[in-house]
Image (tube, helix red, strand yellow):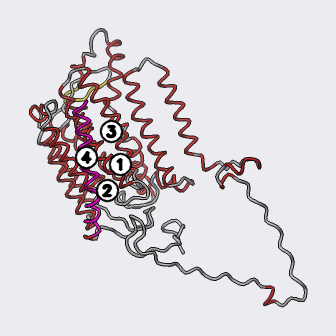
Amino acid sequence: MRDYLLTLCVTAAVTYLLTGPVRKFAIATGAMPEIRARDVHREPTPRLGGIAMFFGLCAGLLVADHLSNLNSVFELSNEPRALLSGAALIWLIGVLDDKFEIDALIKLGAQMIAAGVMVVQGLTILWLPIPGIGTVALTQWQGTLLTVALVVITINAVNFVDGLDGLAAGMVCIATAAFFLYAYRIWFSYGIEAAAPATLFAAILMGMCLGFLPHNMHPARIFMGDSGSMLIGLVLAASAISVTGQVDPDALKLFEGGTREATHAALPVFIPLLLPLTIIAIPVADLLLAIVRRTWSGKSPFAADRGHLHHRLLEIGHSHSRAVLIMYFWSALFAFGVVLYSVHSASMWIVFAIVVLSAVGLVLLLLPRFTPRAPRWAEAFVPPRYRRRPQALPAAPPYEGMADADAAEEAPEERVPVPAGINGATAIGARSRFTDRRKAGTPS
């Protein structure tokens, strides 16, 4: 555990320290696209944050290679090299897209090629554990197609959820923390060395996200862009593939005794083997809803819009920060709930706690729909939105002899926005002090 934590800290430190220079580089190269209709930020913000995250990945792998307890991962497995090869390719495509806006189909082809590069070097799904049946071996073509599909789905799911400051990095970090605990338990408790690469990948991915989050929290100083979102999506998929398709469930000695006993004993392990799908459950749901929504309206599935889950949270009435925290909450509930159930599947308290937390999450989700009003004596202790509005006094009628010109109320002078120049950490160029609060894309 100490070596994993050291690798995590080095990855986070390198990512954090490089993000500042990368931001200046992005500003100098003009990697700051204009604000689009689907964007929620109001100021041009530099991208290319994935550059710092990629070098953090390289630093984490380099440090792990020189640690005595983790060096065996590189000697006994080719998966770290496979991950680095696929990550370098997808990162390069993401950097070009952040600067030049590459077509969506080209990016899709690059994602499939990056997945194929990892498959060629041995990072692929060899078998699938199926409850009640056991381990089912896959042919080479079946394993390749399943691996490529999982990589592409994960990359695009993470890319779709990257719509608010700190959302993608935070959700992936939370989900990866749960995945790390599960992979470390398989590696340490059961003594299965095949789970060591997945544990290492999860630790490095957490470091990448933690190092980038201080620069990306609202208001964001820099965005990770496609170079970052596709990169962490690929690393997340590589971790899932490594532990799901490489670790043989038979080595866990679960299929002993009768069929019923073996199935019941294997249930806690079969569920976490689907953990890669649960940790991206929210992004995948957003991805599927977006495809159905756009296809139903006659648009391309790759056409951008403002119908994502985080956009809907903002429309309900949540603030930017609260919408991000709600997404964090649901991501943690899905991921850690599955891990806890895998450890103590016989305890009904875990199921009860998950149900209670789900109810709390629904209340938080619908909170803006309720407009509670505090009593008069407590109005001084609550925020203004919970206070009762004072009733407006009726306007006095004008005097009979008053002229129309005197009776008419003078129109207020129009406030001219004052250019603010470079304001804060994210504003580049002139910005109005009076931001337009209308939804993007609405008519003037």
* Position of the C terminus by quadrant: bottom right
Let me know if residue 141 is in the magenta part.
Answer: no
- Picture disc at residue 234: 4
The answer to whether marks 1 and 2 mark residues whose Cβ atoms lie closer than 8 Å is: yes
Report the residue that reaches farthest toward the top.
257
Mark 3 closeness class: few <14, some 14–19, many ≥20 residues within 10 Å: many
Which residue type carries mark 3? Thr
Q: CA distance from mark 1 to mark 2?
A: 9 Å
Q: Compared with residue 21, is residue 161 higher up or lower down, i.e. above or below?
A: above
Q: Compared with residue 281, is residue 300 higher up or lower down, i.e. above or below?
A: below
Q: Which residues are magenta?
A: 1-27
Q: Earlier in the sequence, mark 1 or mark 4?
A: 1
Whether residue 146 appears in this view of the structure is: no
Task: Name the residue that disc number 2 marks.
Answer: 224
* Position of the N terminus by quadrant: top left
Q: Secondary structure at mark 2?
A: loop
Let me know if residue 18 is in the magenta part.
Answer: yes
Residue 73 percent across, percent down from the top left: 14, 33
Task: Name the residue that disc number 1 marks.
Answer: 169
- Picture disc at residue 176: 3
Q: Residue at x 39, y 61 (%)?
A: 304
